[in-house]
Structures are given as structure tokens and as C-alpha cells.
Image: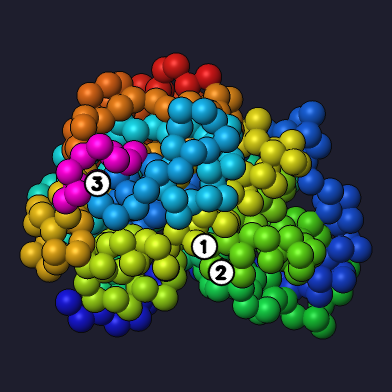
Amino acid sequence: MSRAMPVPEYTRRQSLIAGGLSLLGLTSAELSAMRAASAAPVAAKHRPNSCVFIFLFGGPSHIDLWDMKPEAPAEIRGEFQPIATNVPGISLCEHLPHLARQVDKLCLLRSMTHRMNVHGPACSEIYTGREYFGPPVTDQATPQDWPSLASCVARYGTQHGGLPASIVLPWYSQFVGQDKRIAGQTGGRMGEQFNPFLVQGDPTSSSFGVEGLSLHNDIPAARFQQRRRLHAQLSRTTNRVEGRTVSLSDSHYEQAFSTIETAGAAGAFDLHREAAALRDRYGRTKFGQSLLAARRLVEAGVSLVTVNWDDDSRFDKVSPHWDTHHQNFSKLREGLCPPFDQSLAMFLEDLHARGLLDSTLVVVSGEFGRSPRIGLITQNGMTEKTGRDHWPHAFTVLLAGGGVRGGQVYGATGSTGGYVTDNPVGPADLAATILLHLGIDSHREYDDQFQRIPQQLCEGLPIRGLG
């Protein structure tokens, strides 16, 4: 399939925010002077719960990474060897040595399962916690999509310090060559105005930042506040004349003002405030620096940060990202495992050292796993003898923090890693677990703009026995 560079999509909500930011700008120095009190992270004793949802687009091979079957035949177990971890009895792939030293913080949930083997609909099921609504004929988002968990938190989560409750970085997952992002990442049938706040770009770049926060330097703090008061007065006058309540656009302008003040003053998106040595330890990759940004956002009080995997393999027509239809082992060994291993291990270590892990639930998932038998074609005819095809029937999710007991394995698969044999967990249950941690009622209802009926945020049950 021929794929071109993705085209960024911007919602009305983000246009309003970005527009407000660009029109009402301050220099970083002025922002710091105006809101110095906002610069400190949320105090630990009052810290709200957060979640960092890490999505490994393409579907990582569970059987080669964290649910290995060394006793299985060669065409199943593959080329890699398991290594011991810092928890006796739990092993990981030999190409995850850094993560092996952090397993005392991890729960290996080896019993994730669903039935969708097409990327877009499968991504939708993980992003939304709902079974895909229609036939799997497209990978791309549609207005009929279920709302993403990130959108549910954007709408019903609690904002802290003026920052959005739900932030996505460094991009919306998307196949090169398709004009829309992958399914399940938007407000969908809840409404695009509830899309999460997107921080798009390359966090390894010196110019990385939020569009609209690079503000005009000819507007002093006093003038900025005058504009804010003027907008509030005009809004109240319009509401009185028209006899209406505050509109979504009013609330979005207010969020724009608040984001200018809080993000600028606290430097929530400014990775240059981190020591160069720490940035090196995270890894100077998109993934590593995105996790570092996620840690900063958690410190600033953001409820849900979604980190979508991105790397240069997006241009591989057969096996982009974790979608290893060919050269499964060399791609994992040389391209995927090293940056993933370094960055996630450092992220967990950093959260723990800063006292953030207890309140921060870390979730690492792809849309599915890979076929137990090497070279088996299950969905994609381009799968080669050196690759593994899609496999939704059993795969692994990594959990850490947020009250989840580390150093444990939850659930199990059979001797080939193909099917769940103990404690099956579906996407809805994972979503319910995240919502419970964030203090959002999963039974809360919203108006479905597609079916014109009320819908529950989630139909799953929180996973039991993780603590």
C-alpha cells in the first residue's frame, strides 16, 4: 500500500484554543512573572490520580517480548531467549534488559483478548473500550466511532491548574497514505468538540512546543489581562441580550486564557527545563522525550496523558511501527526494543523516584498481539515467512503504579501463547479500570449524536485482584 505523509486534523475546539493563544500572547518571561505561583508541581499530599496510556501502534509481539514460550516448537517460540528479571520466576525477552530491572514495578497482564484483527477497528476497541460498531472495512476514524477514553476524560475529567484534563502526544496514530487518523481517537459520536488536546510535533526538536504557545512578545501582561476582562464583559453582555447560557466557545476561550497562563508559567511543555543528562537517560527519541513530557504533565496535574508510539518506520509499507509482518526479529531487536526498553524503564524509575507512581497508573498496550506461528497468515496477505500476522485472541498489557501491585503476572495463555486460559480481560474492562482510577463514573451517560440515544461511557467492569 502506498502511503504519504499524514495530514494533521484540527477540530473546532482546538482551533478556538489555538486561535485564542495566538491572539492573546505573552513572552515566557511575562508569563512566569504573572503566574509564578503556578510554576510548582501539584503538591504530593494533594496529588490527584493520573494515568499515562502508552499505545504501541501496530501490535507488539507478545510471544517474543513478555509472554515467551521457550518450550514451544521453534516455529512458535522464535529466535529470542528469555532472561531473568528482578522478580524471581518472571522472565522477559533478552532484548529488554533495562525493563527487566523494573519488573518489581510492573504487572504483566497476559490475558487481554478481543476478536478484531483489523488495525483500525482493533485500535478503536483499545482506545475506546467498546466493541467496534460496524464491519471492519476501514482503518480510519469516522463520525460514528465510539468516543475515545481520552475524549471521555477531556469531557468528564477534572482539570487541575488550568491545563486540559486529557492530552495526546506527539501525534494521533495514523497510517501514512491515509488522510484521516486511525479509528477510535476522537470524540466520535459524542462530538468532535470533546477531542483531547493534541500536542503534535517532534519532542526531540529544539522548537518542540504547543502551537499557539509561541506567543507574540509585544503584548505585556497588563494588556493580556485587559483582553481577558474585555472578552468576559462582551460574553456576559451577549448572553444577557440573547438570553442564553455560556456556550462551548465561551468555555474554550476561557480554557485558552487558562492554558496560556498555566502552561506558560509552569513550563509544562518545556523539556528544556530538564537536565540534559536526564533527557539522555530517557533517550533522545520521539518516544523517550514524549514520556519525559508525560511525566512533566503528570506533575502539573493532567489526568490522562496518551503517548502514541511514533518512529521513522511509519514509511515502511509492509511493517510500520510494531506491525511486524516481515523481519519480525530483526525489527524488534534492532529498531523497536532498544528505544522502548530504555525509555519505559527510565520513565518508571523516574516516576517512582519522584513519588508519582502511587498516584499514576501506567498502561502500555497495542491493538493486538502477533500470531503464535511465524509466517502464518491470519489477516494480512503481505505477511512473510519472517514475520508474524495480527492476533487479537491473546496479548499482553503492561500495568504499573496507580495501586497495581508490581512484580506480578495476571492471567495466562496456553502453551503456544495463542489463547487465554485464565482471567480473560477485554478492552471494556481495561477502560473501566482506568476510569475508576481517575474517579470518573463509567456508568455516566452522554448523548449519542449518531444513534440519538443515551450511552454509557463504558460497559466493562474494573479488573479485580490487581492490588
The relative height of residue 280 versus residue 342 in the rendered view (above or below) is: below
Q: Quadrant of the N terminus?
A: bottom left
398 left or right of 135 in image: right
Badge 1: few (under 14), some or many (20 or more) residues near its Cα, within 10 Å? some
Identity, as a three-letter code, of the amino acid under mark 2: Thr
74 left or right of 103 in image: left
The relative height of residue 228 versus residue 38 in the rendered view (above or below) is: below
Q: Residue at x 57, y 56 (%)?
A: 343
Dot 3 or dot 2, earlier in sequence: 3
Q: Residue at x 91, y 63 (%)?
A: 33
Q: Which residue is mark 3?
A: 77
> Is residue 27 located in the magenta-colored stretch of the structure?
no
- Image coords of residue 150 (percent x, y): 45, 46
Dot 2 or dot 1, earlier in sequence: 2
Dot 3 or dot 1, earlier in sequence: 3
Helix, strand or loop at disc 2? Answer: loop
Q: Which residue is mark 1?
A: 339
Q: Which residue is mark 2?
A: 285
438 left or right of 279 in image: left
